[in-house]
Image (cartoon, helix red, strand yellow):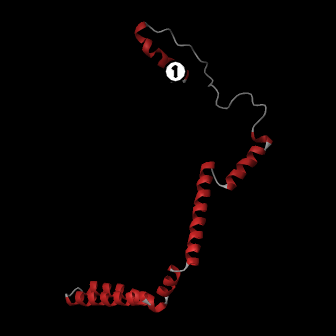
Amino acid sequence: MIAETVCSAVSAAGLGIAIVTAYRKRYLAAVRIAAYSLVPIGLVMTGVVEWLADTAFSPTAWAGFGLLGLAWVLFMTTRAVERRRGGTRKERRAAAREAGRSDAVAPSAAAPALGRGTRPATRPAPASRGDDDFSDIEAILKKHGI
């Protein structure tokens, strides 16, 4: 009953402000203020305010909100753990199936796929005394074919 009275007072005050605004020849703003001021009384008339008041003072409703919050926390925790493990359950099952197959890796592989190139590795020429600082870098670059 108090909530309905407060909402009615807010609506009446808003309509008063709308009238003053219209008197100042700001009609667009006055109509907008009137629209906003009619919302609280509309909520009272539809019963939303009574439902909210009953919900706000109901221990059962607050327990329900607590359970919803707990469910949300559990859901977010499982999502975080899932992201740390790497993928969804469906992706992990597909990876497990691929790992379980015998033809996933050839057992008699002779050489790794990313082995050395076809060019033979050459030893770097002996460097002079002034080039000692760069001889290691030159060797690494020649090793990689640069």
Give residue 98's position: percent from left, percent from top: 74, 46
Q: Residue furthest right?
A: 102
Vertical position of residue 87 compared to residue 48: above or below:
above
Most foreground residue, 99 or 78: 78
Where is residue 65 shown, x and y percent of the image?
56, 72
The quadrant of the rendering that contains the N terminus is: bottom left
Which residue: 54% across, 80% down?
Answer: 58
Count numbered badges in the picture.
Answer: 1
User: Which residue carries the number 1 mark?
Assistant: 140
Give the answer, above or below, for where 2 lies relative to 72: below
Of the residues shown, which amino acid type is indicated by label 1? Answer: Ile
Q: Residue at x 77, y 36 (%)?
A: 106
- Image-quadrant location for residue 2: bottom left
Residue at the far left: name it: 24
Answer with the quarter of the image where residue 12 lies. Answer: bottom left
Q: Residue furthest bottom?
A: 45
Q: Secondary structure at mark 1?
A: helix
| 110 sits left or right of 124 in the view | right
Crowd around label 1: few <14 · some 14–19 · many ≥20 (10 Å): few
Residue at 74% x, 44% y is 99
In x, y percent, where is residue 28?
A: 27, 85
Q: Is residue 130 left or right of residue 112?
A: left
**Residue 123: image location, x then y, percent:** 56, 13
Image point 48% across, 90% down: which residue? 46
